[in-house]
Amino acid sequence: MMSSKKKSGSKGQKGRPNNPRTSSTWKLFPLYGLALDDEKDGFNDPLWGDATLVSLTVARERVARGATSDAVLVLTHGRLSEALGERTPGNRETLVEFPPEGYVAVRARGDEAAERRRAEKIRAMLTGTRFLRGLRATAFCGNPREYAWYLAPKSLTLGGGAPPSAQIQQIVNPNIVQKPVSVSKQALRNSVRTGAPIIAGESWDLHYQHGICRVLNTLTPSSLEKRIITSALIAQDAACSSNFAKLQLAVTSYEILFNTKNFTDLEKRVSSFVVKLPNGLTLQDIFKSRHDLTHRARQDNEASIEALSTAAVVVAWTLIDIATAFSEKLTAKQFDEYVDALVRSRELDEVIGRVIGEENYRAHRQLVHEATKEKRGALSLNQSPPP
């Protein structure tokens, strides 16, 4: 017996996913830490063509026009525990309600994994650009579990003829933006199109010429851009994580970007670009602490793990930003060859320094720095020439 086939609801879509640039269906992904204060256009004139940011209010209005009961519960009331219902293992009273300040909206394309990855790229772009502009090293996130780690007893009261009682405190993740950054939707649009600051008095912008913004919005990335995107997503995870995980993930980001797991080679490649870190820290501090924590479950370095892990993430975003300067002209293989050439040049300079003496060596390095500054861009976090 022949089975009947249900006709497609729209012409031209049979067997193909929605065009991400024209689909009218949007998937919403939570965004914690960024609040839109003048949301008027909603989903019209999206910031990045296939993606935009919308406020919680707009999301509520959209879902009020018809959606599943779970979506209504989560978006309209933020009642996550009610939406999860009996599907949640354990005691539902331990769930903390955290409605997000807004959402990353991605045009539906029939590929849930691709839609989620697109939202992750937007969050990484928002976090990375703030890191690169020297603003506070905290991240935007998409998961309430990243925002609030757990509930813990603050104090217990026993005896005195009264029933036992307890005060519970919420333990929050200090790496996440705690006080939402309030921005104007129009300011975001101006920044994307013209490079204007998003917030007056700050250098934060999302212009497409800002390397990381261009790469993270590329729909058909090159081989090097694919590596940069993966490295940026790992750096975003690192920025949201605890100090130990932050250090681990930041170094993993280096490994992806420079295509090596050999720590000796990795340290040489990273040091070809990043010469000096803030607060007197060194790359050796980062790599040694990562090794000690991973293989010995302890850290012997005197520097605090918090300072080291934060510096490690700053290095990750800096390396990503530098790599984007090469991504329009070089393939991944050419980039690797260029970095290896820098390593060999640095090793040769060190040999020359031992032969001609420290004073002449410093003069030589200054000449090299000046000659390559325009081509190579900023090669250290503090913008100073190598010693």
Image (cartoon, grey):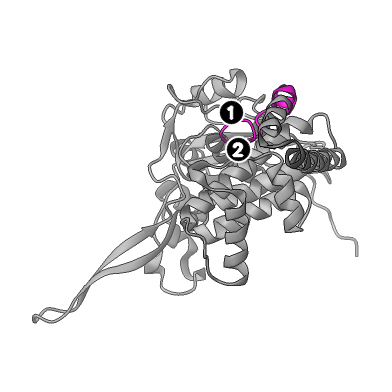
* Residue placed furthest toward the left: 161
Location of mark 2 (residue): 125
Location of mark 1 (residue): 206
Q: Kindly tell me whether residue 113 is visible in this rendering.
A: no
User: Residue 326 at x, y = what percent?
Assistant: 77, 32
* Viewer-proximal residue among 329 and 40: 329
User: Residue 229 at x, y = what percent?
Assistant: 71, 43
In the displayed structure, would residue 132 be above or below residue 83?
Answer: above
Decide whether residue 372 is among the magenta residues.
Answer: yes
The local crowd at label 1, few if under 14, some if 14 to 19, many if 20 or more residues have their Cα within 10 Å, is many
In the displayed structure, would residue 147 be above or below residue 361?
Answer: below
* Count of marks overlaid on the render: 2
At 50% from the left and 57% from the top, the residue drawn is 243
* Residue placed furthest toward the right: 1
In the image: residue 153, left or right of residue 112: left
In the image: residue 302, left or right of residue 161: right
Location of the N terminus (image quadrant): bottom right
Q: Which residues are magenta?
A: 368-387
Location of the C terminus (image quadrant): top right
User: Residue 343 at x, y = what percent?
Assistant: 78, 43
For the residues labelled 1 and 2, say whether their Cβ atoms are less than 8 Å apart.
yes
Q: The disc labelled 2 sits on which kind of residue?
A: Met
Decide whether residue 312 is among the magenta residues.
Answer: no
* Viewer-proximal residue among 347 and 174: 347
**Mark 1 secondary-structure assignment:** loop
